Amino acid sequence: LKYLDYGLYLQLPTYAYIASKDEKLKNYEFSGMYINSLITTKNKIEISKDGFIPKHLQLAGYTINNIEIAQKIDTTLKGNKAKFISSLWINKSNSLISKVCSKDEFNIMTNKVDELFVNANKKIRNNEFEISPFFIDENRNACRYCSYMDICYKNESQYKVINLKADDETNEEAKHDE
């Protein structure tokens, strides 16, 4: 969710936003949002003897920060690590760890997605198509697979350099100040 402010990794938040606006779902509460990899021929569908599901078959995403609800979604979440949802476990203090969010964080996320969509709509209607590719690192940048990279008029000063470590340090400092 830390990429949301940059308009990146919007697939799950977009689904959550759409679901939050659907009249048919208005009586339901957010409990999690997940994505799963497609099964390819190179990924074998094998579950180990201890019932552990291979990483490529596990759900990836966010779970509401509520152990009872998380255990209903993934019934294997008993003592510590979930077997069906990747990166989810219960620590010694009996708290969920990893990709969890509160109801408030979920609401903030769906509001942010709404804001991003409204702003994108305004820019499109005003014919604003600025060149401002993002750059996180060599493997995560907007131009890496672009077919038009050789003829693009972008220059280095137009990149939005995203330094999440600096953001995390700022957030940590804010936590210590509270």
Image (cartoon, grey):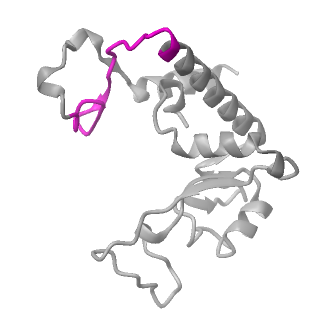
Q: Quadrant of residue 118?
A: top right
Q: Residue at x 65, y 19 (%)?
A: 177
Of the 4 image quadrants, the one containing the C terminus is: top right
Name the dominant secondary structure of the magenta segment. Answer: loop
Q: Residue at x 71, y 46 (%)?
A: 19
Query: For this view, does 105 lie left or right of residue 46?
Result: right
Residue farthest to the bottom, as pictured: 49
Of the 4 image quadrants, the one containing the N terminus is: top right
Q: Is residue 25 above or below residue 85?
A: above
Q: Which residues are magenta?
A: 124-146
Q: Quadrant of residue 142?
A: top left
Q: Magenta span has 132?
A: yes
Q: Magenta span has 105?
A: no
Residue 119 lies, in percent from the top left, at 57, 17
Query: For this view, does 124 lie left or right of residue 151?
Result: right
Q: Is residue 102 above or below residue 133?
A: below
Q: Is residue 32 above or below residue 147?
A: below
Residue farthest to the right, as pictured: 27
Q: Residue at x 61, y 46 (%)?
A: 15
Q: Residue at x 49, y 28 (%)?
A: 7
Query: For this view, does 164 lie left or right of residue 113?
Result: left
